[in-house]
Amino acid sequence: MEGENNTNQENQTPTEETKSPKNLWAWIVLIGIVVAIVFGFYYWPNIKPAEAPVNTEEFNQPDAATQALEQATTSDEVADIEQDLNATDLSDLDRELSDIETELNQP
């Protein structure tokens, strides 16, 4: 009887599941997905977004308000601090903020 079992196992053909073209396509798709994931992880950190050009000429020009603030005294006396605060002109601050807001809202 053992001899019969051995011959039956040797003569068995592979099941339809292992020969199926669907199984082959499933493996091909799975390998493709894995390759795409590896490719994405390798190249994603190397992608740099396009940078908008920056006009540096505007930043290099001296500003009267900035120069006035740089001339503040270094004294910590109350009278000197009050004098520096009174000399500081913040009236255009609101205009500057509205200009920035308009630039940000442009398409």
Image: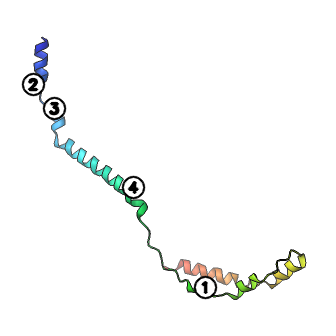
* Of callouts 2 and 1, the N-terminal one: 2
Q: Is residue 101 left or right of residue 49?
A: right
The residue sitting at 35% across, 53% down in the picture is 38
Indicate which disc residue 41 carries: 4
Give the vertical position of 53 relative to 5 (above or below).
Answer: below
Mark 3 and 4 residues: CB-CB less than 8 Å, in contact?
Answer: no
**Mark 4 vs mark 2: which is more N-terminal?**
2
Alpha carbon separation for disc pair 4 and 2? 47 Å
User: Which is more foreground, mark 3 or mark 4?
Assistant: 4
Circle 3 or circle 2, nearest the eye:
2
Question: Element under label 1?
Answer: helix
Label drawn at residue 60: 1
Image check: 93 left or right of 45? right
The residue singled out by tag 3 in the image is 15
- Residue, disc 2: 11
Amino acid under disc 2:
Asn
- Given residues 18 and 47, the one toward you in this image is 47
Q: Amino acid at mark 4?
A: Phe
Is mark 1 in CB contact (under 8 Å) with mark 4? no
Tell me the distance, in whole angstroms, between the alpha carbons under discs 3 and 1: 78 Å
The kind of residue tagged 1 is Asn
Residue 20, label in figure? none
Looking at the rendered image, the disc whose residue lies closer to the viewer, 2 or 1, is 1
Name the element at disc 4. helix
Mark 3 or 1, nearer chain start? 3
